[in-house]
Amino acid sequence: MTAAQAVLLAVVVLPGTVGAVLALTRAERAAAPVAVLTAGVTTALAVAAALARPALAHPFVAGADFALEVDALAALVLPMIAGVTLLVLVFAAGSIRAAQPRFHGLMLVFAAAALTTATAASLPALLFAWELMGATSYTLIGFRWRDSARVSAGLTAFVTTRTADLGLYVAAGAAMAGGAGMALADLPAADGPWRHVVAAGILVAALGKAAQLPFSFWLSGAMQGPSPVSALLHSAAMVAMGGYLLLRVEPLLASTGWAGPAAAWIGVLTAVLMGIVALAQRELKQLLAASTVAQMGFVVLAAGVGAVSGGAAHLVAHASTKALLFLAAGAWLTALGTEELAALRGSGRRWRVVGVTATVGALSLAGVAPLSLWATKDAVLAGALEASAWLYAAGLVAAALSAAYAGKVLWTIWRRGVRAAVGEGGTGTVGALEQAPLVVLAVGAAVLGVLALPPVGRTLAGALGGHGEVSPVEMLVSAALALAVLLLMLRLPAPEPGWAAGWLGLEAAAHAVVVRPALGLAHALARFDDRVLDRAVTAAAGAVPLLARAAARADDRVLDAGVDATADAADAAGRGAARLDDAVVDGAVEGLAGRVRRLGQLARAPQTGAVHHYFLQAVAVLAAGVVAWSVYAGTG
């Protein structure tokens, strides 16, 4: 193993190992420092890996390796994930007070899963990281497990994304059947029909993780988690990884002819509809959650139209911007004890650092020039314009909505004549550890737009694929549109479309279409089991004693009769055998004994004791011998 490969391995193993150890200990005081130190080292290793661009693979199953690789796309995203993790953990060190080992440990394990996802070069590695990322997201969203509502929100997020994740398993099976193997780069080479199945499976899994339509509703409940969790999971990690996966497999989407356009339209429709949802929210974290889904729509749109460099730049710039806004929301939640927009009025003037940095993030989110998301959105929209004028028009509507909900936030936090009051549970303070990461992230939200501007944009397009430079006219149009909408929002009350406040009723629709029918089927099967199968088994069990008793009676009547008959036959046979013994066997024995007695008597007769009798016997025996010899000699 080379030094570069060792660095890549350390990037994913170090945070995972330290996180697992922390989560199993009770080192309250050491947890935050150890986690921050580990995240710092991981960030340095991620930068080194991005520069060295290593790859490593290990045999996993026949025809499939567990492979990791830092290609151009991963080299851009890997430091972003590690860096945001570091800043979020610094913030958490000042805001998370209870169960710190478990919290920081799970955050590091989650970061390790996200880093593995970013570097996965084969489906086995991707599946492993994807599953671990989903499992740890469930534990982090429901971190305050004594609150059943938070646990339920984590379960909703897990089940929803887990259902979509099944697409990856379908894709893996189709890739093997299609002869392409498990390497992500080889998937476009799968046989025709199987290639479409692979693309469909990956598209569904990615849309689920990225909270795109129709899966968007799970992100609303996920806001029940602590603010640092939202800042990492829903800006730079899990949600972002859904869009990242589609950017990585863009050649596969393009090779099918349908998957690319499908992704593009789903992305742009999500950006528009979730922009309206964001505008309708009355809680800051809910607004930011809906805006996250909308901004991921731009990334999905980029993957669908082949604007990979623009999508990657938007992904990175959005991670910094949205992590900043989520952490600012967390700082206000800690200080004021609420995230209701009505209660946050004037909060920007009360805590200036939080207010100013959040303003930078909101202006970037609005697409105001020259901040980050202005340039990166235009890079995506340029690709959309080349593909379809309708896609471009829908993208402009989504961009205008971005400015509208960002303006709603700005109007709230800087409103004059109102001073945000500390509510129940609020601390009234924002510590230095909570403010420092905001400053760093604000810098990123301001300058990361260079990834889509010349000359960096041209270089990135050459490495990743894309559409090169964006037309100055298009950039001026989008900047003017964002500024006009923003000024309008600062002067007029923000519209709050009531029909969109409940996230378009997507969760209710999911319950109506999926959950209730599934539960109804389960109840019907349970009733069938109780009323049919169980009764049949019970009846069969009740019949067994009856059969046993009938068999016993049959035994009494038949077997006993058979035994009696057998006994009679045996008795008759015994009497016959006795007669045979008396008449034949005993007679034969007695006859033989009589003959032996007579022979004995004859043998005793010569034994008279007279010498002359013995002499005569000897002469007779000698004469017999002479006769016998003579006969033998004559015949010879």
Image (cartoon, rainbow, N blue to C red):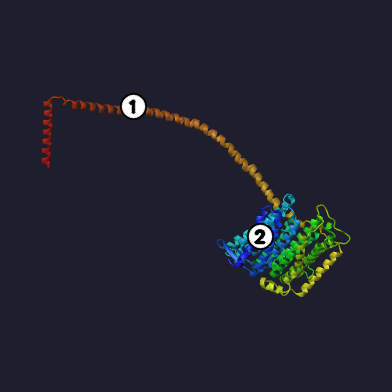
Q: Which circle's residue, 1 or 2, is located before the other in the chain? A: 2
Residue at (68, 51) in percent of width and height: 518
- Residue 157 visible: no
In the image, residue 200 lies at what x, y percent?
A: 65, 62
Image height of 462 relative to 245, above or below? below
Residue lying at the far front in this picture: please name it.
29
In the image, residue 227 lies at what x, y percent?
A: 75, 57
Quadrant for residue 408, please give it: bottom right
Is 106 on the left-hand or right-hand side of 191? right
In the image, residue 375 lies at what x, y percent?
A: 75, 70
Q: Secondary structure at mark 2?
A: helix
Q: State the quadrant of the N terminus.
A: bottom right
Quadrant for residue 267, please give it: bottom right
- Residue 383 visible: yes
Q: State the quadrant of the C terminus.
A: top left
For the residues labelled 1 and 2, the Cα–Cα distance comes to 101 Å
Name the amino acid type tagged 2. Answer: Pro
Name the amino acid type tagged 1. Answer: Arg
Q: Secondary structure at mark 1?
A: helix
Classify mark 2: residues with Cα within 10 Å, few (<14), some (14-19) or many (20+): many
**In front: 337, or 165?**
337
**In front: 234, or 11?**
11
In the image, residue 343 lies at what x, y percent?
A: 84, 56
**In front: 478, or 231?**
231
Residue lying at the far right in this picture: please name it.
417
Is 563 on the left-hand or right-hand side of 151? left
What residue is disc 2 on? 15
What residue is disc 1 on? 579
